[in-house]
């Protein structure tokens, strides 16, 4: 199957978690959907491809845009509730910072990778995984199937398909400009040229003295002194233990448990400027 996440939404830009609520695609999100459609349309298996999508509007709209780039005889998009994003109950619509304030410690330690299964009145990991596994059992291992879904679904689905440990699966990247080909037990990543530059952070490593070593998917790599940042969005740290808990959040931003985060675009501009002056 060819697995994709929906295009960028307004809530993604605001770093808000919508779960089973919806948020419209942005201009970049629509561009991502068209780019994925063009890429898929050029693949041999696309001639007989069927599309199945989450019924949530952001995924369904992405699927319909992709279908525009397939043959005129392409079947209508079918919808399956089991591909809906995880429900995060009372936290739906909240930002990273708001959740951190409502439930201190949610994004700390190893538990920060499972935060979405801890929401009041939300889905548990077991319940969520069970519905994804149920869908996967009924699905043929067929590269002519295009699956359009959501970030956490895409993580868990790939993990179940490849037999990955739970934590490994929950650490998988969930870009909105990639296609994942799942075939014969293996997963290959297909890069999509969107036409709008979207630098993606692939690794961030904390260093002494409040510095970060940041690596991007286009090869740009280098250290940054967080305390030297000129942006008002740069978080303030009072001890290095808190600083060391840096991670890449579900929006591709550099983030800390307390809530502050820096987008990949901000980090990229800052890093390239820093490297240019050396």
Image (cartoon, grey):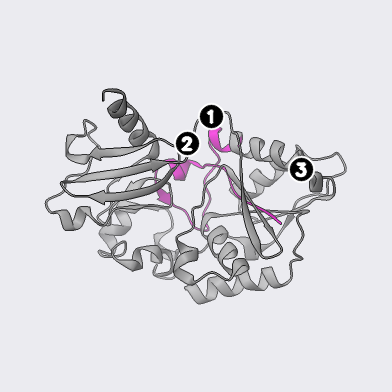
Q: In this rendering, which labeled residue sits more in front, label 1 or label 2?
A: 2
Left or right placement of residue 132 versus residue 249 in this view: right
> Callout 2: helix, strand or loop?
loop
What residue lies at 79% left-to-right and 46% top-to-bottom?
A: 46
Is residue 251 in view?
Answer: yes
Mark 1 neighbour class, 10 Å CA radius: few under 14, some 14 to 19, many 20 or more: few
Q: Is the residue 1 above or below the residue 61 in the image? A: below
Q: Quadrant of the C terminus?
A: top left
> Callout 1: helix, strand or loop?
loop
Q: Which residue is mark 2?
A: 218
Q: Which residue is mark 1?
A: 196
What residue lies at 65% left-to-right and 55% top-to-bottom?
A: 55
Q: Which residue is mark 3?
A: 43
Q: Is the residue 50 above or below the residue 115 in the image? A: above
Left or right placement of residue 53 versus residue 25 in this view: right
Mark 2 neighbour class, 10 Å CA radius: few under 14, some 14 to 19, many 20 or more: few
Pick the front one: 48 or 273: 273
Residues at marks 1 and 2, CA–CA distance in whole angstroms: 14 Å
Q: Is residue 89 magenta?
A: no
> Callout 3: helix, strand or loop?
loop
Q: Quadrant of the N terminus?
A: bottom right
Residue 3's disc number: none
Residue situated furthest right in the rendering: 73
Q: Is the residue 277 above or below the residue 201 in the image? A: above
Pick the front one: 205 or 55: 205
In the rendered image, residue 21, in percent from the top left (x then y), is placed at 51, 55
Work out whether mark 3 precedes mark 2 in sequence or the reverse, and give the earlier one.
Answer: 3
In magenta, the rendered stretch is 1-30
What residue lies at 34% left-to-right and 48% top-to-bottom?
A: 204
Residue situated furthest front in the rendering: 278
């Amino acid at each position: 199957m060819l697995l994709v996440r929906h295009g960028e939404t307004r809530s993604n830009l605001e770093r808000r978690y919508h779960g089973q609520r919806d948020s419209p695609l942005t201009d970049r999100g629509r561009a991502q959907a068209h780019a994925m459609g063009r890429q898929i349309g050029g693949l041999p298996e696309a001639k007989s491809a069927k599309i199945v999508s989450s019924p949530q509007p952001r995924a369904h709209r992405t699927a319909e845009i992709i279908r525009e780039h397939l043959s005129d005889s392409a079947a209508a998009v079918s919808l399956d509730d089991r591909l809906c994003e995880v429900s995060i109950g009372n936290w739906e619509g909240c930002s990273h910072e708001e959740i951190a304030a409502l439930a201190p410690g949610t994004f700390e330690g190893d538990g920060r990778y499972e935060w979405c299964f801890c929401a009041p009145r939300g889905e548990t990991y077991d319940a969520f995984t069970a519905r994804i596994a149920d869908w996967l059992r009924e699905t043929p291992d067929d590269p002519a199937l295009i699956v359009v879904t959501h970030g956490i679904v895409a993580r868990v689905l790939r993990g179940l398909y490849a037999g990955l440990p739970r934590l490994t699966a929950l650490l998988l990247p969930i870009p909105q400009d990639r296609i994942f080909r799942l075939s014969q037990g293996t997963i290959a990543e297909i890069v999509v040229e969107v036409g709008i530059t979207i630098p993606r952070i692939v690794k961030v490593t904390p260093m002494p003295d409040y510095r970060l070593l940041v690596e991007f998917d286009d090869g740009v790599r280098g250290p940054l002194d967080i305390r030297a940042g000129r942006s008002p969005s740069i978080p303030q740290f009072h001890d290095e233990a808190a600083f060391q808990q840096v991670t890449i959040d579900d929006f591709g931003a550099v983030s800390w448990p307390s809530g502050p985060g820096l987008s990949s675009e901000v980090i990229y501009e800052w890093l390239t400027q820093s490297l240019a002056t050396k």
